[in-house]
Image: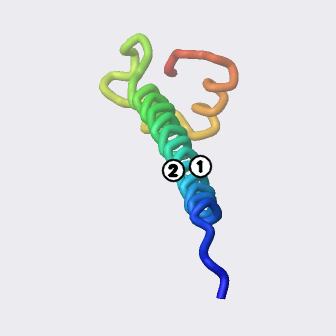
Amino acid sequence: MEKANPGRLYAAFEDDRKGERAREAEHEKLINELYAEIGRLSAQLSWLNTCPGGRCQGKNLASNLSRAERLEMLEKGTQTCR
């Protein structure tokens, strides 16, 4: 029977730890990307729930305009209500 080489065993465990660190880094990156997306979506929702200029008489854009009209505003960069 062959004796275990401590150097080879150490290398095997070190390689495993490198893989684990890489998975942890990838997981952390994914979490940060998801939080950034949540922030962007929250900002968009807040914008849609307000009426620029206060001319919507208490209504938000979602209840005042159709989806097509809201999308058109986003494309044109317009910030006014009807």
Q: Could you tell me residue 7's position as x and y percent?
A: 61, 60
Residue shown at the point (58%, 32%) measured from the top left: 70
Q: Could you tell me residue 5's position as x and y percent?
A: 62, 68
Residue shown at the point (40%, 29%) measured from the top left: 46
User: From where the camera sits, is residue 52 visible?
Assistant: yes
Residue shown at the point (58%, 47%) measured from the top left: 26
User: Tag 2's secondary structure?
Assistant: helix
Instruction: Classify the position of the N terminus by image quarter.
Output: bottom right
Q: Is 59 situated above or below 7?
A: above
Mark 1 = which residue? 22
Residue shown at the point (54%, 16%) measured from the top left: 79
Q: Amino acid at mark 1?
A: Ala
Q: Could you say which quadrant of the image residue 69 lies in?
A: top right
Q: Mark 2 and mark 1: span between their CA atoms?
A: 5 Å
In the rendered structure, are the residues bearing label 2 and label 1 in contact, judged by CB atoms less than 8 Å apart?
yes
Q: Residues within 10 Å of mark 2 (few under 14, many from 20)?
A: few
In the displayed structure image, the side of residue 72 where residue 13 appears, left or right: left
Q: Residue furthest left?
A: 58
Residue 25 vs residue 56, the one in the foreground: 25
Q: Amino acid at mark 2?
A: Glu
Q: Could you tell me residue 6's position as x and y percent?
A: 57, 64
Q: Which mark is residue 33?
A: none
Q: Is 22 situated above or below 43?
A: below
Q: Which mark is residue 24?
A: 2
In the displayed structure image, the side of residue 68 where residue 40 appears, left or right: left
Q: Residues within 10 Å of mark 1 (few under 14, many from 20)?
A: few
User: Tag 1's secondary structure?
Assistant: helix
Residue 5 vs residue 39, the one in the foreground: 5
Q: Residue furthest top?
A: 53
In this rendering, the count of numbered labels is 2
Q: Could you tell me residue 74's position as x and y percent?
A: 62, 26
